[in-house]
Image (cartoon, coloured by chain):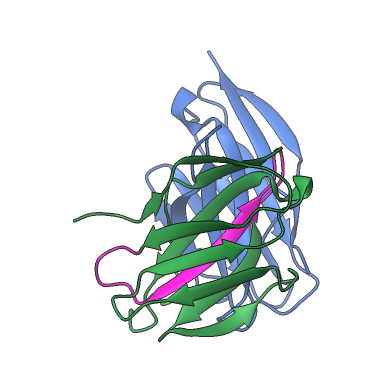
Amino acid sequence: DAGVTQSPTHLIKTRGQQVTLRCSPKSGHDTVSWYQQALGQGPQFIFQYYEEEERQRGNFPDRFSGHQFPNYSSELNVNALLLGDSALYLCASSSLAGGSKDTQYFGPGTRLTVL
Amino acid sequence: QQPVQSPQAVILREGEDAVINCSSSKALYSVHWYRQKHGEAPVFLMILLKGGEQKGHEKISASFNEKKQQSSLYLTASQLSYSGTYFCGASNTGNQFYFGTGTSLTVIP
């Protein structure tokens, strides 16, 4: 049973560029959440997708957008990259239909470096 | 809204016990605990949904006091593999999730 997968593992971009990160949830999970983790900090909630809709959003600007596909996989898009966007981006999947509906399992993350 | 953890850092010798506390200013729906090793993703340890309920995972257990909006993680007879940063995570609506400030735990031989 594959866990949560993310691609790419590492990415280097320059300021002003746009980036798309991808996530495939654990089998049986229907909800995907995205987090940003700066070096030495805890993960910060960006947004959560369920049934292809954004259900909740953290305190992130509109430059951060996302999408969920019918197969539950998800993308995180960041436009007009800033140096401060450099971080580890984590995807977590969970199942709203499950008994422990909030249990989240994390993917290995995508390390984004903005130069 | 970010839960506050204490202590910020702790160093233990193998076999010693530790307690990590997590406190929120908002009412909690559930509390999760994760361990993250350097350069890796957080690994789920346990979730607590009911007030006062303790959950166990090997020699790691936790409690959740809904009234006080607090949770504690108990590590007994620590092993070298326990080293890492521990995060509590709190959900107050079931949708949005906040990680705590983190506790760095180092176990030395």
A96 on left or right of A80: left
Residue closer to the observer: A19 or B88: A19
Q: Which image quarter holds the N terminus of chain A?
A: bottom left
B69, A32: nearer the viewer: A32
Q: Is residue B66 above or below residue B2?
A: below
Is B79 located above or below residue B18 in the figure?
A: above
Please report the residue visible at 43 percent of the width from the left and 46 percent of the height from the top: A8
In the figure, residue B18 lies in which quadrant?
Answer: top right
Front one among B26 and B39? B39
Give the answer, above or below, for where A74 lies relative to B33: below
Who's green, chain-wise? A
Which residue is pictured at 62% across the width and 50% down the height?
A: B87
Colour chain B appears in: blue
Q: Is residue B1 magenta?
A: no
- What is the residue that sits farthest to the top in this orientation? B109
Image location (x, y in percent) of residue B5 = 74, 51
Q: Quadrant of residue A26?
A: bottom left
Residue A20 spot, x, y in % from top left:
51, 59
Judged left or right of residue A106, residue B19 is: right
In the picture, measured across the screen, residue B73 lies left or right of residue B100, that is left
Q: Is A19 displayed left or right of A29 in the figure?
A: right
- Measured as percent of width and height from the top left, residue A63 is found at 70, 68
The range drawn in magenta is A25-42
The C terminus of chain A, quarter of image: top right
Identify the residue at horizontal 52%, vertical 51% (top origin): B34
Is residue A34 inside the magenta stretch?
yes
